[in-house]
Amino acid sequence: MASDVDSTPLVGRADLVATARAALLDDVAPGSTAAVFLTGESGVGKTRLLRELGQRLGDAGALVLTGSCLDIGDASPLHPLRQALRRLDVDLPPAAAASVRALLAMFAEDAASPDGAGALLERVARGLSVIAGGRPVVLVLDDLQWVDRTTRQLLLYLLAGLGDLQLSVLAAVRSESLQGAHPLRRVLTELRRLRSVQVLDLAPLDRAAAEQLAAAVVGRPLPPEAVERLCQRSGGNPFVVEELARDLRDGRDGLSDTLREVFLARVDALPQPAHRVVHAVAAGVEPVDHWLLAQVVGLPEQDLLDAIRATVAHRLVVSSHDGYRLRHRLVAEVLEDELLPAERALLHRRYAEALTAAPGELHQARLAHHWRLAGEPQRALPAAVAAAQEAERLYGYAEAHRHWSVAVELAEGLPDAERATLLRHAAEAAHHCGEYARALALLEKLAAIDVDQTACELHIRRARYLAAAGRSALAEAEYQRALDAADCSPRQRATAAAHLAELLLQLGRYADAGQWAKEALSLAEQAEGATTEVVLASMALGFSEAYRQDPDAGLAVLRRALATAERAGRPEDVALAYLHLAELLTGPLNRMEEGVVVARRGAERVAELGLGRSYETRLLAIATNGLFRVGQWAEAEKVVAAALRHRPSGTDAVELLLARCRLSVGYGDIEAADRDLDAVATMLAGGGARHVIPLLTLRAGLAMWQGRHDVARHAVQRGLTETRSDDLVIVAVLVWHGLRAEAEAKASRTPVDDNAVRRLRQIVDRVAEKSVRAAQPVRDVVDGYLALCAAEVSRLDVTDPDLWARAAAEWDHRNHPYPAAYSRLRQAEALLARRRRTATAGKLLRQAYQTTQGLGAVPLTEEIRTLAGRARVTLEGAGPLGAREPDGDGGAELAALTAREREVLAAVAEGLTNREIGQRLYISERTIGVHVSHIFDKLQVRTRVQASAIFLRSQA
């Protein structure tokens, strides 16, 4: 079953194509035979693969004969061979053309040879040998399940080596057709005994390949939700993927008639008892246990087994150790329309009754599902509530949210008090699993019907959900309303104050956070059981103290808060404690290695607590930032890719996208960086300085690499309006970018904004003044950026190499290779501008070049190359600092590559495209292109073939 769209790419079959080519041509000795039989269900891509392999084998010099078998039994002997001979190119050499005509004439003779079938087969073999003219022959046969008897005999004859011919056979077999005593089953069994014969089963496409195929049909990447649904419905079948993708592209709803007819034809081919089985599995919650299916279907055991075997053989049902599943969820959609509503309800009732009667623990989630679809909401509701409570006990907040949402739907018509309880649980579960918009929507429904909920409680809940959604300004206002509410109890005031302190900490307002933390701790002393409030307030107070006064004392407070949270066992408290501890270590205190370890350990812990989509994502974003700063960019890419699989939202997504954007800006992947920055800007609704300033800083950095100094200037000026942050580090980074933008403008002979420069220098002075009152580690980091600011100011007049030398030393001391390399570039530039110490300038450029090569920092590398070219400085000859050593097995040529570049090169050597590599490594296609370009530069090659040859040579 081939697609009618030949332009779609062949995806997910690279390994199989290589295996088949080697078996059919490369590994076949002269005079020998070989065969590859491709088996698989309809639509899995057998015909497309035959076409692709046939073309490649023909390009490699083989004579390829292509034919198809007909579904008319043995009425047309040797039909596929005769068809293949007729299709041969008319430009064959005379001898070969005469042999083709002779063979076809022999087939047309009415009289049977007195020597029987053996003589016929021998004459066919001789004719093929003459046609081949010494070339290997590849016979490509499609739909071999319909092969006629004479062709079966010919295959056995030729593959047994009885003909004087180097022959390979490539054939496709529809596996669901080989039922019972099908004659081809015996032939394949006999052929499997030959060492030269391989039978390869085409599995469905994996998620990445299905996504790539669908994107090719639609003409654009699909959103993750659409990909997830497409993969579930198609089961990875390429034909089904193409049809569903075409429906998406053309805006069609529902199921196309083509797919409906395909699956109905398969179901209609089943014996009647198997119909009952496939309908029952379609109505069940997969996997369907055997005992449960037996109860629902009601067949005698042997009849049930025979029926199940038929559904499996027809590729409709998959059997595994844990039960039965539909091979394609689309079958359920098709069959749903084939049953009357009463028939569907009866099936679900049978499931529910069987589950209820089963001994042992009830399957509450399944029970709720089946009672609901059986039209019994009053019996489904208790099961849905029980399923939600069970999921919460196991920290399965995503599952709990789903079950609570079902319970809310089932409770329509019940008294408001009962519905309010369900809404409260559903909103909290949505908040915990990262569905922040859903949590806010449920809360508004709750506010409309819950007369018992106090105004203070409503404000606190709304503020928590708004803060998680990244709407911090609104969240702060809600906390203030809670504190001002007349009905607020001491415990609720402590809760509001503690959460407000935590929010202010997130916004970088450390002094305010410390004040509210003290207030919360004071209020908590007046309330019983305020452990959560004490933990939150202690974290805010510890962070504030570590930043502003005493790092060791503040860290000790944070560690005690983490220990308290672990003892109390509330998942969100544990997550926040890890979050703030990792942030403090990787940020203001500059203890990167320790901070990355804490972040990754915390990510593992909160994943165990069911908070993977929210807090695990944020902790991995912190780890990514730490790895970026210490120059481990390849490892940072892996971490951010792992976090993106959670598909985060709200603040969690903002943190992660900013972390990924730092990598993209460093790599020079402008398109990816722009996309992430636009997404962050859309999500930030009053996000505060903590997110807005980094967003605008990255926007400025990206614009400078594009030569758009006015855009960079505007971004910095917008960032300077965020004046409420106490975080001197992010302000210092922003000011450095502003001064650098003005210096770059001057260097490119475009106007410098003197007013902007004057304002930036004033802010530098204020930051320097404030940093004196900060803790020593904070002052050290700020001093590094102030050194860069002073050096950039010198570029506006006469650039001072000594200031750049000081900046390089500052960043070397802190083990931040990227700003150190940038400083060396500018120091070399200053020395060359003064026409002195050119040898020192050359050394500095080589050091900077080695660092940026190791990082993969393409734009900075290009700037170093440009300056070196003007100064006639040779940069080659030394591997990148920090690059991994070769493995000791001939990898010296790869010594200049980073770990990530080696991964990319290995994939290039496999013949994968940039898109396929990106899907494998969870990186954008654009970033892969950047890596490939960098690899070409380092290996001094121009093509993928040359790069692959170097890689393969290193593995020899």
Image (spheres, grey):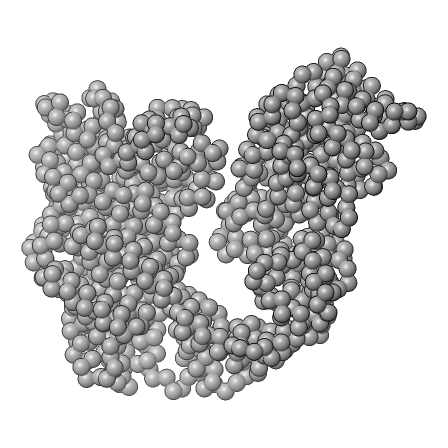
Q: What residue occupies the far top of the structure in this picture?
A: 94
What residue lies at 47% left-to-right and 85% top-to-bottom?
418
Quarter of the image with the C terminus in it: top left
Give above or below for 109 relative to 337. above
Q: Which of 322 and 228 is in front in this view?
A: 322
What residue lies at 63% left-to-right and 42% top-to-bottom?
45
Q: Can residue 811 be seen in this view?
A: yes
> Image quadrant of residue 564?
bottom left
Task: Say left or right for 710 vs 782.
Answer: right
> Image quadrant of residue 299?
bottom right
Q: Where is residue 397 in the image (x, y as percent from the top left)?
A: 42, 69
Q: What residue occupies the far right of the structure in this picture?
A: 111
Give above or below for 20 relative to 105. below
What residue lies at 59% left-to-right and 58% top-to-bottom?
320
Q: Where is residue 60 in the image (x, y as percent from the top left)?
A: 59, 23
Q: Can residue 249 be seen in this view?
A: no
Task: Say left or right for 48 vs 933.
Answer: right
Q: Which of 235 and 472 is in front in this view?
A: 235
Q: Position of residue 631 (x, y in %)?
A: 25, 42
Q: Which of 663 and 325 is in front in this view?
A: 325
Q: Position of residue 527 (x, y in %)?
A: 22, 84
What residue lies at 77% left-to-right and 38% top-to-bottom?
147
